Structures are given as C-alpha cells and as structure tokens.
C-alpha cells in the first residue's frame, strides 16, 4: 500500500506539472513559421536559436550542476533582508501633474522603472509581481511589501520597453493589469509573441533587432546588444532575442542594460550611441559559475566606463533572490569599484525619484542601516 501510494503521488505530481506547463498562460506564446523566417534574417539566429555576438557557453556539466545544487540546498546567510525594505510611495497626481520639462526616473526594485520624459510615461521591464516565477509557489517573495504605486493607480502609460522574456523582467500578471492602459510595447525579436498570446493587440507591439531604431513621437528607442539568453519553459531557451536599450529625447540620452554578461558590446554601444547622460546597469544575481551571462559587480562599474556615461545606477538587485550572494553584496561591491574608477553612481531608495536635470542625484548608503 505504501509503495502504491508513493507511485500514485509521483504520477499526480508529474501529471500536474505537465498540465500546468502545457496550459498555463504564464509560459506565453510560440513563434510561427513566418516569425522564424524573420528571425533567420536578423543575423543573430542559427541552428534554430538566437546567438550572442560573443561566444557564450551555457553548458552545465555534472560537476558544475552538483556544486550549484549543493550551494542552493545549503543556502547563503543574509540572502534576504530580515524585514521588508522601505518603499517611498508615489502619488498618481505627482505623475499626472509633472512638468514636461523634467526627466524623472523612479526605481521599483530589481530592473523595473517608471521613466517620465518629454511629457510621456515609459515603463521599463515592469515586473510588478510578488515572485519571479510562473507560479507564486515556485519563487521567493519580493523584498518589499507592495510597490511605490499600485499598478491600478498608474496613469496612462505611453510605452512599455522589455529587455527579454525571463520571469523577473516579463511578468504575465503585470501585463494583464497594464495592457489596457498602454499605448505601445517595444521588445526584442520574438518577445512580442508572448504579449500577443496574452491579448495585447498586434498593432501595439513593435519588435526590434539589435541596432534597429524606432521613433515614438519625439523619442527614439534604439535596440542594442546584450550578452544573455532567453526562455520561459524547458524547451524554449534562446527562442527569443534579448537586448539592451537606448532611449533618446531632444535633451537626454539614457541607457538601460537589461541583463548581460560583460563584453565588448558595451564599448561598441558607447561608441555608436554615447556619450550617455545616465545608464541603468545590471548588478545582481551573479556567480562566477555563470559570469558569462551576468556581470560581477566590478564588471558593472567597468561597463559603465566603457559606455561613456556621466552617471550609472546599479539595478537588478534589491527585490528578489535569484543567486547565491547576500542581498547587500551587489551594491557594496559596485559602489566600491565605481569610486576606484571615478564613475559617479546613483543609489536611490525604492520609489525615490531621480531628476536627471538636477545636478545632485540620490546617493545615500541607505542599505547600511538595514539588516
């Protein structure tokens, strides 16, 4: 009877997992044959998958896999703060009544931002869900209780920009809440198929290849390379493109790194599109064993130098546990290296606005007083 019960439980688990993967909307869409033909013309697609410009190994040998598994089982002390991180609230009227003459960035934690520029509201990688996973049971919760502003209270959003389709950047529930108030979505090649699957009208979706540019009224969005990968299920790795973004107005030149390992593409982007007024740079969820797809903090500071930016801000930290380091490690290491490289760095609290026209930017070491 005990053996039969164990076998039954195993079968139930596998059947439940199969049905969830097959029918859950979280996993998004699949490319059509017509879309694949477009991918083939991109210059970054071969053998049925997208490729990095720089050779990037994703091989996971038995030894590496077992070492990572062991470390995840043992865990790391202080991966999460003891108490929820503080969040500065935003009033929707502050957004609606903002002067068109200012450019303001507000961090929601991790890589999510509200960019107010030229009288427009732009969301960047708006992952507003509680866990970076296809189901809340499958991930650790956000470091904060709530967001600077609830999604429902956001005013009209002129555009949403996505860097790639991983769960900590492209969130199904967030899209479902946002899609009725967004004018246009901008994504790397293939990512739009998820949005279409979730009911976003095709005419509102714009997919770009690396080095493509597109106008959004008086703004220019430029899709640039990154060194990473994509995928939302077991069988779709590399099926969509990943990217960084340049956002240009008549007065500001802003860079958003998305997720990326370090490489020569940062210097190439700086030479083609720089210098930049402000750069949001990935810094978090790293490990020496996967350093080709996520920068170490010291590399983040060097990448900002390569870009030729006046100021950088470390992102991709302060919200979720996705790697084997303490929650403070990214910000402590990157600020130290930025000082060594004489790279100005902004370190706002979650919800604290950064006004690019002001000479002073938030730079307190607010995390030092939090355990």
Image: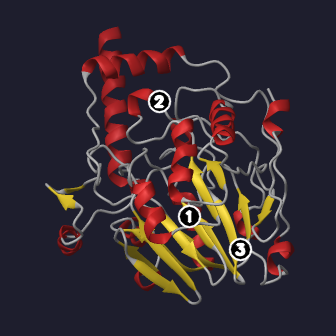
Q: Can residue 205 be seen?
A: yes
Q: Which residue is pictured at 45% across the width and 82% down the height?
A: 214
- Which secondary structure, mark 2? loop
Q: Which mark is residue 365?
A: none
Q: Is residue 41 above or below residue 20?
A: below
Residue situated in front as seen by the camera: 202 or 331: 331
Q: Residues within 10 Å of mark 2 (few under 14, many from 20)?
A: some
Instruction: Return the x and y of residue 251 as percentages of the image width and height.
Output: 67, 80
In this rendering, which labeled residue sits more in front, label 1 or label 2?
A: 1
Q: Residues within 10 Å of mark 1 (few under 14, many from 20)?
A: many
Residue situated in front as seen by the camera: 6 or 99: 99
Instruction: Return the x and y of residue 35 as percentages of the image width and height.
Output: 24, 72
Instruction: Return the x and y of residue 51 as percentages of the image width and height.
Output: 25, 54
Badge 1 or badge 2: first in the primary sequence: 1
Q: Which residue is pictured at 69% across the width and 40% down the height?
A: 339
Marks 2 & 3, CB-CB < 8 Å contact = no
Which residue lies under the disc numbered 2?
287
Q: Which mark is residue 255?
A: 1
Q: Which residue is pictured at 33% across the width and 22% down the height?
A: 65
> Could you say which quadrant of the image residue 39 lies in?
bottom left
Marks 1 & 2, CB-CB < 8 Å contact = no
Indicate left or right for 250 with 81 as reference. Answer: left
Which residue lies under the disc numbered 3?
116
Q: Residue furthest bottom?
A: 217
> Could you say which quadrant of the image residue 192 lies in?
bottom left
């Amino acid at each position: 009877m005990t053996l039969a019960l164990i076998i039954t439980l195993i079968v139930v688990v596998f059947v439940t997992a199969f049905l969830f993967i097959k029918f859950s909307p979280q996993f998004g869409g699949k490319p059509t044959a017509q879309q694949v033909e477009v991918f083939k013309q991109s210059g970054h697609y071969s053998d049925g998958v997208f490729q990095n410009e720089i050779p990037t190994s994703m091989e996971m040998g038995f030894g590496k896999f077992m070492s990572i598994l062991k470390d995840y089982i043992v865990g790391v002390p202080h991966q999460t703060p003891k108490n929820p991180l503080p969040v500065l609230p935003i009033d929707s009227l502050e957004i609606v009544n903002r002067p068109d003459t200012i450019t303001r960035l507000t961090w929601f934690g991790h890589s999510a931002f509200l960019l107010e520029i030229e009288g427009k509201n732009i969301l960047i990688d708006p992952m507003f869900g509680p866990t970076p996973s296809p189901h809340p049971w499958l991930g650790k919760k956000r470091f904060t209780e709530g967001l600077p502003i609830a999604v429902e209270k956001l005013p009209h959003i002129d555009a949403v920009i996505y860097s790639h389709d991983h769960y900590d950047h492209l969130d199904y529930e967030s899209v479902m809440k946002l899609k009725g108030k967004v004018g246009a979505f901008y994504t790397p090649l293939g990512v739009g198929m998820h949005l279409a699957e979730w009911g976003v009208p095709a005419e509102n979706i714009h997919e770009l290849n690396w080095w493509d540019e597109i106008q959004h009224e008086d703004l220019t969005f430029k899709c640039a390379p990154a060194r990473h990968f994509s995928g939302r299920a077991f069988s779709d790795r590399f099926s969509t493109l990943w990217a960084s973004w340049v956002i240009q107005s008549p007065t500001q030149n802003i860079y958003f790194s998305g997720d990326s390992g370090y490489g020569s593409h940062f210097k190439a982007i700086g030479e083609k599109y720089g210098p930049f007024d402000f750069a949001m740079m990935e810094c978090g969820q790293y490990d020496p064993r996967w350093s080709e797809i996520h920068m170490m903090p010291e590399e983040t500071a060097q990448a900002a130098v390569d870009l030729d930016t006046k100021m950088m801000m470390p992102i991709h930290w302060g919200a979720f546990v996705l790697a084997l380091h303490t929650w403070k490690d990214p910000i402590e290491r990157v600020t130290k290296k930025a000082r060594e490289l004489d790279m100005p760095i902004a370190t706002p609290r979650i919800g604290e606005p950064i006004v690019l026209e002001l000479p002073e930017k938030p730079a307190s070491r607010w995390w030092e007083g939090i355990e």
